[in-house]
Amino acid sequence: MATNQRYDIFIIGGGINGCGIARDAAGRGFKVGLAEMNDLASATSSASTKLIHGGLRYLEYYEFRLVHEALSERELLWEMAPHIIHPLRFILPHQKGMRPAWMLRLGLFLYDHIGGRKRLAATDVLDLRQDAASEPLKTGFSKAFEYSDCLVDDARLVVLNAVDAAAKGADIFPRTRVIATKREQEVWRIELQNQAGEVETVYARLVVNAAGPWVDAVLGNAFSLPGVHNVRLVQGSHIVVPRKYEHDRAYIFQNPDERIIFAIPFERDFTLIGTTDQDYMGDPADVRITDPEIDYLCEGASLYFKEPIRREDIVWTFSGVRPLFDDGASKAQEATRDYVLKSDGGAGKAPVINLFGGKITTYRRLAEAVMKQIETHLEKRGAPWTTSAPLPGGNFSLDGFLPIAARLTHQYPFLNNNAAERLIALYGTSAFDWLGDSRSKEDLGRMFGAGLSEREVNYLVENEWAKSADDILWRRSKRGLRMTTEQIAELEKFMAKQPGCTAALPEDIPVLPKYGRA
Ligand code: FAD
């Protein structure tokens, strides 16, 4: 940390919204600092369903503004990050007694037409009696709709925004909590506490509170505004099971309670099933999947799959808390998913901008909206610039994924096709940077298991702020799904010896508790 450093903008929270704003602001020439109390993306932004989507279901709640904005972001984000974002087709089986076919057709017609779709394929009607999509399903489904959205590696989207922000001059402080702020007329005095418990002070002309589920807690604790209530915390959980079917499309299933759940091809050998939607009252750091949620997801998916999903099939679970703006909706699933910005200050009073709600899909648009407010409070620096600037490693064309993976195996013949595709899916063209002058597998150093090498780990420590085995296994990659307990223990020992990476954190900093191995 840099004591007494002065910033134009200081951001609280290293989820997708904080990191997206940091990137946009740094790219416009503002001096930016960002503090994240745990690892980047350690909260909601790594616990999503991982869709870059318009949100078909939100049409039922007339959220046309949100759906339009989100749909129009899909192709733009895909172009910015074709290594971590991929188009995906979704099969929506028509089920008697659920939403009628005309309603699904109308919703999908809007979905296809209100978002400026150009490259993503349009909706199709499937005859399930003729289509491989029916193979894993129970008999009796004859008709389905198939439409497009995109899948994203959510945690990597966050970290790549942070990497780009830092490349543009932002200071990123992971494992640093904002513990207090004080307005000193036109400047904020901000106290930061790092992992070792040390407290330092920085100053900023404007603060952005992007603390997600903690946004009200930050207002209460760090801004001394107790009792504020802006967000409704809504828990959502997922289960991961061994791959349920051979094809590469996803399913969207309608449940009898009118909710929907997705079954999505995940990390090549797995299927991701989620999510739930239930009000959450506890500390967001403690969120974990509950037994009733597991039952709900297993039962919901088993209404459709002919081989039921059983509890004992589950290899991993994760759970997150949506920080939804509290619009007074009666049911959790009806609360708006749109974002709301509220600012306070100006005219001699240093401003603070608080963010509520939002989606991964709309983070770039949210950042632009925040920049508009920032520029009214501070001064105008640069024009919006993020629509066409690739994220690190994403500087290749939409059909360039396989050719680049082939180039990687050509340049590094000791990598097989699977390994090359894995590395391009994580790092894109940056994989060439850290593989560097390696000539053989031995040049990658120690192998920790599941293809994870010492060279890759070092790259993540030096360039992506990885500080613990969890950071690497569950956020910078998903190698945790494939490594044994012993291999993980070895990686933990290795990480504990790296400079700046300690196993222990001060007791009051919650340590990434939401991941569970079943
Ligand atoms: P977060 O990611 O929670 O980041 C806030 C950060 O602030 C945290 O990392 C926290 O540690 C930090 N922080 C808090 N207090 C302090 C402090 N005092 N000092 C420093 N740091 C602090 N969106 C989609 O577009 N597509 C989806 O498929 C999708 N699926 C979802 C499924 C589920 C189950 C959930 C829960 C959400 C889903 N979302 C989805 C929504 C999306 O994940 C969230 O809107 C988004 O991740 C919120 O990002 P954020 O940056 O606001 O919050």
Image (cartoon, grey):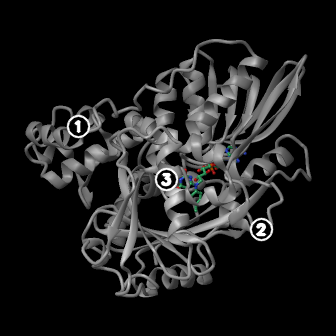
| Residue carrying label 2 | 281
Res 61 quadrant in image: bottom right
Dot 3 amino acid type: Phe
If the image is split into quadrants, where does the N terminus sit?
Answer: top right
Three-letter residue code for mark 1: Gly
Res 397 quadrant in image: top left
The nearer-to-camera label among 1 and 2 is 1
Q: Is residue 411 left or right of residue 446?
A: left
Q: Nearer the viewer, mark 3 or mark 1?
A: 3
Image coordinates of residue 115 in percent, x first then y, are 51, 41
The secondary element bearing badge 1 is classed as loop
Residue 294 spot, x, y in % from top left? 54, 81
Instruction: Point out the tag, 1 or 2, that comes first from the N-terminus.
Output: 2
Q: Is residue 371 left or right of residue 20?
A: right
Comparing 126 with 395, the one in front is 126
Name the mark on residue 400: 1
Residue drawn at x 73%, y 51% as measured from the top left: 214
Q: In this view, does 305 lie to the left or right of 214?
A: left
- From this view, report whether residue 255 is shown above or below residue 64: below
How dense is the environment of label 1, judged by Cα within 10 Å: few (below 14), some, or many (20 and up)?
Answer: some
Measured Cα–Cα span from mark 3 to mark 1? 30 Å
